Amino acid sequence: MIAIKSSGRVPAPSSNLKALWLTLVAGMACAITLVVLYTARAHALTIILNGLLIAMILSIKPRNPTVRWFRFFLLFFFGIFPLWQLLVGDEIYLKLFPQDSAPVVLWYLLSMAGVALIRIALDINGKMLTHWTARTDRTARAGGLAYLFAALSLCALAFMYAKLGGYSHVVQLYDTRVESNGTDYDPFRGLGVIQAFANTSPLWVFVCLTMRRRRNVLFTTIAFVQLGALGWLSAGVAGSRQGIVFVLVFALFLYHGFVKPISAKKSRTFGLGVALTGIVLIPLKLGLGYSDLAKLPQRFAEQRDLEVSMGPLSAFLFRDLSRFDVQAVAINEVEKPAYELAMGRSFVGALASIVPTALWHDKPDTFAQEKSEIVRALERGTMDKTTLLFGMPGEFLVNFGLMGFVLSFAIPVWLLIALNRVGRRSSRWTALRAVMWPLPFLFFLFDSNVLVYYVVRWVLLFGVPMGFALNWPRGKALPRIPGRMDRLAASERS
């Protein structure tokens, strides 16, 4: 994430305070482990493997704020949520393997190998991950290209509603989703790049309203309000949570980079607000609606035919933020002698998915083909194609086997290195850096076809054009971020 500096200097905590916190955390972890083992809720082997995996994750050196957030993500994705799901036994559409079963043990071993690869790669490329601070450039102005993209994205949004029969009809289509299974129905399906372009409309309008020569509180307020309104029209009304959450996050990046610096304290507040927004939108994503929220867990259990410990929250934690169960199922299937690896076929299908059907009638299917065959006998549902996500490591597993799963962990490291270089020399690419920031995290959550759509929507249709859509006052050089050579030259002059 773009570093956000605090307005005041906060003293570093003393070593005694750190030691106290470490002691408390270690003591609590040991107590929980003993209770879990004593009550026979966890197998001893599972606790040992999970402890080793957590230790390996915590050994990753946080060389910059993004790597620190990445380590925090890995801790929960690999070290917390899988063990939690095994302990409570929540089966969300898939059967859970026993804790001491071969697929579960093998998943832990492969994950440890992947995390070890991440740590080695980060250590080798440590110099490329040096922390730097982005400055707020208040001289940037939205150029004619920004207004053109804003107009075109709004036209794409209007075209969507004209094609689907207006807002009321789209709401009816979403109600159909609520009344059905709530997962496999998307009113905007088939609109492709038009929908992707429409999704960017809140950000283009935000840029045009905030990056003006004359700025005032009124236009800034309108800019933030329209994020929710256009975000709802372009994504939320169809049950998409990502479109709203990503828009809010990217807008905060832009505000900090071009309008006004956001202090560390405010950034935590905004981050909490975005997280709460994502949680509030859980019923929207699950297709449950917002009527009678008190009975939400009951309606979730009835509609999905699931008996889980925390209702929709279980689905959020163990389905949205974890890929443990589906990857364990994939490991079990791939290890069968008769299984034929896809050998990259699904990645070709992902790239082909962005080509309009009118131009390529018989284009290859996406990863949905392989993963549907894997989970068909185990998934609770009647859909021909599963909507479960395996994450990119899971897709590499199905394509290239166990080694593919492990080696795929090197890709997020490459993304972290590339991200640390974007916008370092010029604030022109601040928007591109903002939309690229989630990619190392989304690599573990999304399949290739979803990542391709993300890149088209946010990188190609917003991040890259934004690099050419900004103007600076005549006679003023394009702002540059001080680099190592600049600092060396300054020291020599002094």
Image (cartoon, rainbow, N blue to C red):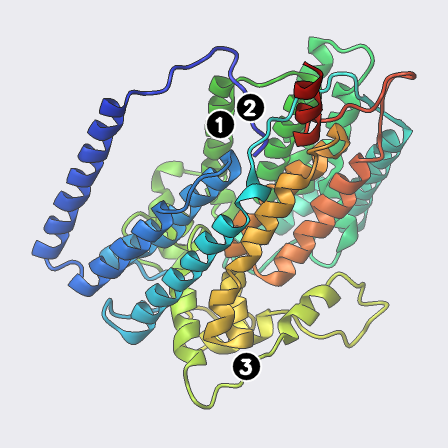
Viewer-proximal residue among 109 and 239: 109
- Position of 167 with respect to 104 (left or right) is right
Q: Nearer the viewer, mark 3 or mark 2?
A: 2
Quick one: quadrant of the N terminus? top right
**Which element is circle 3 on?**
loop
| Mark closest to the chain's N terminus, 1 or 3 | 1
**Circle on res. 4:** 2
Q: What is the C-alpha distance between the residues marked 1 and 3?
A: 43 Å
**Residue 170 appears left or right of 475:** left
Q: Is residue 77 visible?
A: yes
Instruction: In the rendered view, tell whether residue 491 sits above or below residue 67.
Output: above
- Percent position (x, y) of residue 15? 27, 24
Q: Amino acid at mark 3?
A: Leu
Q: Amino acid at mark 1?
A: Gly
Q: Which residue is mark 3?
A: 341
Please state the horizontal and vertical placement of residue 359, each as a whole percent of the image.
86, 68
Tag on residue 273? 1
Residue at horizontal 73 percent and vertical 32 percent from the top: 425
Of badges 2 and 1, nearer the viewer stands 2
Mark 2 neighbour class, 10 Å CA radius: few under 14, some 14 to 19, many 20 or more: many
Outermost residue on the bottom side: it is 338
Q: Earlier in the sequence, mark 3 or mark 2?
A: 2
**Vertical order, 151 against 196 (above or below):** above
Cα gap from disc 2 to disc 1, whole angstroms: 17 Å
The residue under label 2 is which amino acid type? Ile
Quadrant hosting residue 333: bottom left
On the image, which quarter does residue 217 sit in?
A: top right
Q: In terms of secondary structure, where does tag 2 sit?
A: loop
The numbered disc on residue 307 is none
Q: Is residue 218 above or below residue 340?
A: above
Residue 26 screen position, x and y as percent? 19, 40
